Image (cartoon, coloured by chain):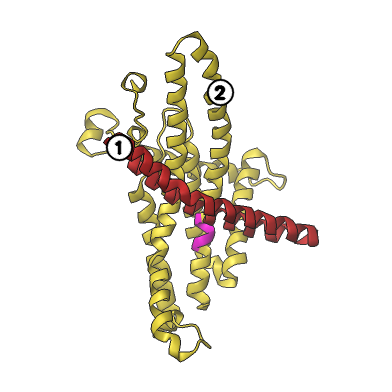
Chain colours: A red, B yellow
Amino acid sequence: MDVLAAKALGAGIAVIALAGVGIGIGNIFAALVTSVARNPSARDQVFGLGILGFALTEAVALFALLIAFLILFT
Amino acid sequence: MAAEAHTIDALGQFTLTPVMGQMGASMNFSQSNLLMLIASVLILSLLYFGMRPKAIVPGRLQALAETLYEFVYSMCSDQIGHEGRKFFPFIFTLFTFILLGNLLGLLPFSFTYTSHIMVTFALAAFVIILTTVVALRIHGLHFFTYFFPAGAPKVLAPLIIPVEIISYLSRPVSLSIRLFANMVAGHVMFEVFASFVIMLSAAGALGVVGAVGPLALNVVLVGFELLVAALQAYVFAILTCIYLHDAVHLH
C-alpha cells in the first residue's frame, strides 16, 4: 500500500476513539442539566464540576487527535 | 508554500528560532523564552499598576487584578481547605503563567509556550514533586498508606497498590499532556483551516467564494480557543489544588 494512503487510513482509525469521548461529554452535560433542573440553587457548585469533567474527558479526545496528527504530519 | 506542495506543514509553527539577533542566538534565547518573559512582566505589571491606586471603589485594572486574585483564592480555599492559603501564591503563579501563555499564543505572529511538552511537563513535574514533598513533610511515612485506602479488603492489596501507584505516577503525564495537546490541537486546527483558505483561493474565482467557509470557521475557532485557553489554565490549577488536597488530607 502507498505510504500516504496508509497514513491517511491510520489517522482515520486513530480518531475512532472520539466516539467514546462524544458519549462521555454527552453524559456529563446531560447529568449537569438534570442536576441544575432538579436543584437550580446548586448551579454554581455543579457547574464547576461539570466543566472540570468536560475538560478531563476532552483530554482523552486530544490524546487520540494527537496520535492522528503524529501519524499525518511526522 | 503549503498550497504548491499540496501538503500542510501543520507542525512547523512550533519550531523554535532564536530572537534578538546575535545575542539571542548565542544564548539560545528563543521566542518561547521571550513570550515567557513578556507574560511574567504583564502579570507583574497588572498586579503592580492595578493595585497602586488602592481605591475602595476599584477602577478597571484594579477590578481585574482583584477578580483574578479572588478567583484563585476561592479556588484554593474551596479545594484544599484552610491549609490552602499557604499554597495560594504557588497556585496563583501557576494559573496566571499558563493563562497568559495560552492567551498570548492566540495573538498573530506570537508563540504559545504552553504548546511545548517540555514546558508543560516541567510545570507538571514541579507540581507532582511539590505535592509529594508536602505529603511526606506533613504525614511522614504515614503517607504511604495513601496507596492503600483504609477499609479495603487485605486480599485485594496486591491488586490495589500497583493500581494506585500507577495512577499516582501517571498524574504528571496526564497533567502535562492535557495542556500541551489542547494547545497543539487548537493551533494545528488554525493552520489546517488557514491553509484550506490558501488552497481554495489559489484555485480560481469559485475557490475564492468557497474560501469564505474555512475563513469563517477560523474566526469561530479563535473564540473557541479563547475559551479553551482559560479553561485549560483553570483545569491545570484546579487539578493542582486537588492533588495538594490529597497531599494535605490523604484521601
Residue plotted at (66% across, 54% down): A29
Tell which residue pokes out farthest to the left in this image.
B26
> Quick one: quadrant of the N terminus of chain B?
top left
Residue plotted at (57% across, 25% down): B216
Which disc, if any, is residue B30? Answer: 1
Q: Which residues are magenta?
A: B236-240
Horizontally, residue A21 falls left or right of residue B170, namely right
For residue B242, say whether it is visible.
yes
Residues under labels 1 and 2: Cα distance?
A: 35 Å
Q: Position of residue B179 (x, y in %)?
A: 45, 50
Amino acid at circle 1: Ser
Q: Residue B58: say if magenta.
A: no
Horizontally, residue B75 falls left or right of residue A37, namely left
* Image position of B162 with respect to A67: above or below: below
* Image position of B55 with respect to B141: above or below: above
Asked if the residues shown at circle 1 and circle 2 are in contact, with their CB atoms under 8 angstroms apart, the answer is no
Q: Position of residue B143 (x, y in %)?
A: 43, 81
Which disc, if any, is residue B213? Answer: 2
Residue B191 picture quarter: top left
